[in-house]
Amino acid sequence: MSSFYHVINVILDVIIVYAFVSNFNYFVLMSLGFFVLRAQRSTEGSVERDPLFKSRLMPPISILAPAHNEALSIAQSTRSMLQLEYPDHEVIVVNDGSDDRTLQILIEEFHLYKSARQPLHNLATAAVCAVYESQNLKLLVIDKASGGKSDSLNAGLNYAGTPLIAAVDADSLLESNSLLLVVRPFLEDESTIAVGGIIRVVNGCTVEHGAVTKVGAPPSLLTKFQVIEYLRAFLGGRVALSYMDSLLLISGAFGLFRCDRLIEAGGFELNSLAEDLELVMRLHRISRERKRTYKIVFVPTPVCWTEVPDSWKSLAIQRKRWQRGGAEAMWKHRRMLFNPKFGVVGCFGMPYLLFLEILGPTIEVTGYVITILGLLMGFISMTTALLFFIGSVLFGTMISVSAVLLEEFTTRRYAHPFDLASLIWAAVLENFGYRQTNALWRLIGVFQALHTKKKKVWGKLTRRGFAPQAT
Amino acid sequence: MKTSASSRVRVWISIALMVAAYVAAVYWVCRESRAAAEPAARLLPLATSLAVVPCVLVILLAIGSLIAKSFRYIARVRAVRISPEIRVTLADVAAGGGDREHLRELARQHPRPVEIIFTEFLASFGGQINAELRILAVELGLAERWRKETRSRNFLVQKTALANLGRIGDPIDPRLLHHPQEQTRVEAGCALLSSGSADAPAQVFKMFPEQSQLGRILLADSLRPFATEICGRFLADGIRSADPRRAKASLDLLRAWERWVPIEGFSQMVAELDIDLRLAALPTLRYASTTGQEAAQEVFALLQFPEERAHAAAAKAASDLGLSASIPLLLNQLRTEGPVPALAAAKALVEMGSQGQDLLENEILSGPRPHYALQALEQSLVAGRG
């Protein structure tokens, strides 16, 4: 029996040491995020719209928007993409075997004609049925057999003739100046190969004519929790990781890439549940292996608004999928882990992703299970268990409130003090049930990565569209 | 723009100090709470202190920021209320009448809203009103404030100050053109140009090649009114320069302006450059060549250049210049080369008028690669209809 207690003690020690490392790491990343955002705030926001908008020196951009059963929002989001402020951009919507009226709506709304346009690259994709073009707008619609999101992006990539490619979700809204902002790292440094923008939650905001006109905190607690998660991930994590040249994820909802590097890398990975993460890992790997100078960066000012799930069921599906995708991508590129040949990406970025993002939920759930077992079997006192729980809640609260404060100290998109207060309150409440449930979903996601066969899927969630949602 | 080396160092020093303070606080709390530990969780005091220390810090920050936000909110609401009065008073004074004393009083009581509205006026009005605003900027102490703010570490503050000083014709400190931060250099260059200083175009043109593409776009726009002077005095030397960066920058200027500014012997000058610079020069041939024949020579040379990557851009230049003599070369390009140059050739043929279009129709019927010809013709027809 004493050896059993010894093992339990060791496990508890491991969990506490893990808590120390992750706590310290989050603290450093948040602090770094804060200082970097402060340093960048004035310059990032100082974009000169007019000279950029009329300059012939701006590189043309193709926006790839894969769509699958998006009849509810496709017209509005396509119009919003066409209206973006940029001197030379084309929108390529890829209809991936939709069963609804997505294609018909596009044809009718934008007066499309069947075009003879030919692909310029030859990435393998599911069969393209037809290509449609607008008579007077820079809009191309590719109608193809269903093949998943990555397959659709690759199909769009085949038809793109511009040096830069923006990959966006067809059900997201880009802010009007987002292209002008996201292109800046490419203009500042020729070695930039990919740039990610920030994804923000549109639930609770007022949307008019395809643009967010008023930013507000969402009404439901579940969506507020997700606002905090997005702030934590983008303003804390990605700003700091980008600063340390170890950014591994450019969100699939909004990223800008150099076309030649995407083609060279073979496009987006088919069958991947986290094609965005996998692609960035691959771009790092190829660039490092070929000993190139390159930059993959995150910029916090170009905003893409996305609708997040407002039901527990949809959220569970999404989180399991993300975690599973992350674990699969990590396994595929495991050779980079702790490999000095891959520099800071291999020695910091990949271990960070593995230990904090992929294995984190496993350790957290193990901690809860052992504490409950210890209480039931009597080898942990109620005081100790409570201390564990309080420590865990305080720790989680600190990270989440820091994320909200980071937003407040830097970008300040939520104008009303009530929004700030409600988000801080949600950052506290998040630790009572939501965080634990999320850890469990993510743990299931890791198990699914180990046991379930891969298949091409669209991570579709139930959307309400962009009808005015403010309360 | 990019984070400079000095700001990177500042960020890392700040992080190091914060981490040191954090570790010290955790150690202190951990030592104080060690007595409560039990064997089943030997490291519990450490875990608790790890959670408590940052939590206290964050709660303090949260309270502080809520208070600050409330103050800012109130200030914003007050500014919205007072703005109409400031606007009316400033407009009256700038027009030559109005109550100057009341304006001074408003500037004392509401310095920020007055500055914002004053800046809007300065950017919007010229002539007599602008001259009056220049005097007012000095009277209200704004010019002095802006001079100080050009040394601010906040770029937005610095940028606004520089732009305003430029608008009121105040001399710009030339050292700012060599500032370590690119955005400051660029803003100082733009302000210098708008201040009307006689040697401003020469100074800005000199710094132009050292900037990133973004800096060049911004400066090129400000240099546009001085295009003739720059072409006449500096551009030819820039293109001939042994420094490829300087040559590229000079060509970028021409591309950005899109103005007919002929430079003697431009095409011959370009033909001596390396292939990347020659490709960068292609879109500028029609603006900078003194004769069409001279430009055509360079386009023909690039259409026959051994590397295929030159051909798409050369085809576009051929169509821009309407070089019907290039049709055989374009036809060959359409039939034999990769998708990008082939499509560029088809599009160029469409632009060549009926001769090119007839050839494309033949290609659709009997050529080896009808799809590019079809695409180019279709796009041309649709564009014509649209």
Image (cartoon, coloured by chain):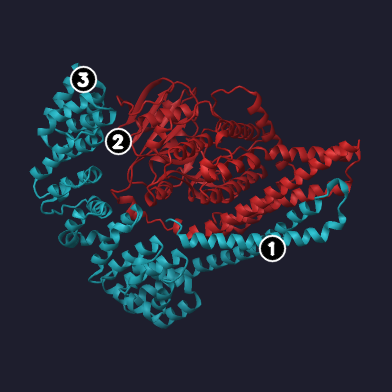
Neighbor class of circle 1 (other Cα within 10 Å; few <14, some 14-19, many 20+) is few
| Nearer to the camera, B245 or A242 | B245
What amino acid is at disc 1?
Answer: Leu
What amino acid is at disc 2?
Answer: Asn
Chain B tint in image: cyan
Label 1 vs label 2, nearer the camera: 1
Q: Pinpoint the chain carrying mark 2.
A: A
| Nearer to the camera, B80 or A168 | A168
Q: Are marks 2 and 3 in contact (CB under 8 Å)?
A: no
Q: Is residue A281 visible?
A: yes
The first of marks 1 and 3 along the sequence is: 1
Q: Secondary structure at mark 1?
A: helix
Q: Residue at x 26, y 68 (%)?
A: B200
A149 to the left or right of A82:
right
Q: Which residue is mark 1?
A: B60
Q: Residue at x 36, y 78 (%)?
A: B136
Q: Are marks 2 and 3 on the same chain?
A: no
Chain A tint in image: red
Residue B153: x and y in percent read: 47, 67
Marks 2 and 3 sit apart, C-alpha to C-alpha, by: 24 Å
Neighbor class of circle 3 (other Cα within 10 Å; few <14, some 14-19, many 20+) is some
| Quadrant of the snapshot with the N terminus of chain B | bottom left
B84 to the left or right of B75:
left
Q: Residue at x 55, y 37 (%)?
A: A336
Q: Which residue is mark 2?
A: A136
Q: Is residue A108 visible?
A: no
Residue B364 is labelled as 3
* A79 up-or-down from B211: above or below: above
